[in-house]
Image (cartoon, rainbow, N blue to C red):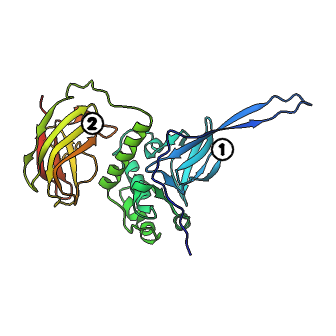
Amino acid sequence: MMQYKVKTSRLLFSNLLIFALVGCGSDDDHTAAVEQKSFTGVFLDSAVQGLNYKTVTQSGKTNAQGEFTFLADEFITFTIGGIELPSTAAKLYLTPLSLYQTDDINHKSVVNLLRLLQSLDTDGDASNGIEISDSVHQLATELTLDFSATDFDQQVAPLIASNGAALQTLITADDAITHFQTTLAKINNSEMTSCTTSHSKVGYSGFFNTLAHNVSGKATIIDDCTIEISQFSYDGGGPEVFFYGAIDHAYASADAFSLGEKLTGTEYNNGTITITLPQNKSLDDLTGLSVWCVDFNANFGQMTFTP
């Protein structure tokens, strides 16, 4: 009977442990004492449990908090069965962005890795942590992947369908990115970083024009990376619906982007929602917002930020 470890939703940033491993020299041969410090890092999409990892001196599986150990100046490689992820310099926290040396949350390989990790999670709910089971490693023993390939979905389909986790198909890019944005916000909060109020658009606001599904409300720029949606109404009726930002309402363009959690299926009546700009975006990347249906490129309501 298969047993699963208890998962955790806590992302432990503030209490990452640092252990000192001290090698003691011999008084007889006057060998100097050598001190090596071992650090505990964490791998995050949410905290990812069950990834194999290896450095020159350390190896094992990430635990329920996504933790791994490393020495200073080491590189680390994570694997899932035969799937080897790009090596990178080991740090106190790592994400798929770190592995691909990018800040672009829409980077194709980053997005496909996010989709894979979240789809392999044992209970299919990445918000409470991601657990990769031993059976996934066994099924993927002979598998290699090109995360930038156009046929990535086809490459991983047999693994997703047969690994025994809750999800049997690969999740969408939009869902994967939305979840990861939440994780990045938690990372920023844990590091006590905060948004400044230096941008000229801080304080700008505007009201949504109703186009469909009873969308209405007001959006206000609170600081350089935070927007508050107030007096918000939406009947929850559309599929794959997000707040989208764009220049001049070009929400179907390649430069448009989602903000916050998916709105699909949730009804709002005079509600208040706080959304955060993605890590690689600024207020220069939007002049307004839409309640945007991704599946049908449909605009349910839009607003323009004005002084």
**Residue shown at 64%/50% (left/top)?**
59
Where does the image place residue 175, in percent across and percent down from the top left?
31, 55
- Left or right, 122 with respect to 260, comes to right
Which residue is situated farthest in the right direction here? 28
Please, what secondary structure does the residue beneath circle 2 have?
A: strand
**Residue shown at 61%/35% (left/top)?**
73
Q: Are marks 2 and 1 in contact (CB under 8 Å)?
A: no
Where does the image place residue 289, in percent across and percent down from the top left?
17, 42
**Which numbered dot is residue 134?**
none
Residue 157's image quarter?
bottom left
What is the distance, in whole Å, between disc 2 and disc 1 at their CAs?
A: 41 Å
Q: Is residue 177 above or below residue 164?
A: above
Q: Earlier in the sequence, mark 2 or mark 1?
A: 1
Residue 282's image quarter?
top left
The residue at which mark 2 appears reads as 226
Where does the image place residue 266, in percent across and percent down from the top left?
22, 58
For the N terminus, the quadrant is bottom right
Where does the image place residue 18, in percent across and percent down from the top left?
61, 38
**Which numbered dot is residue 56?**
1
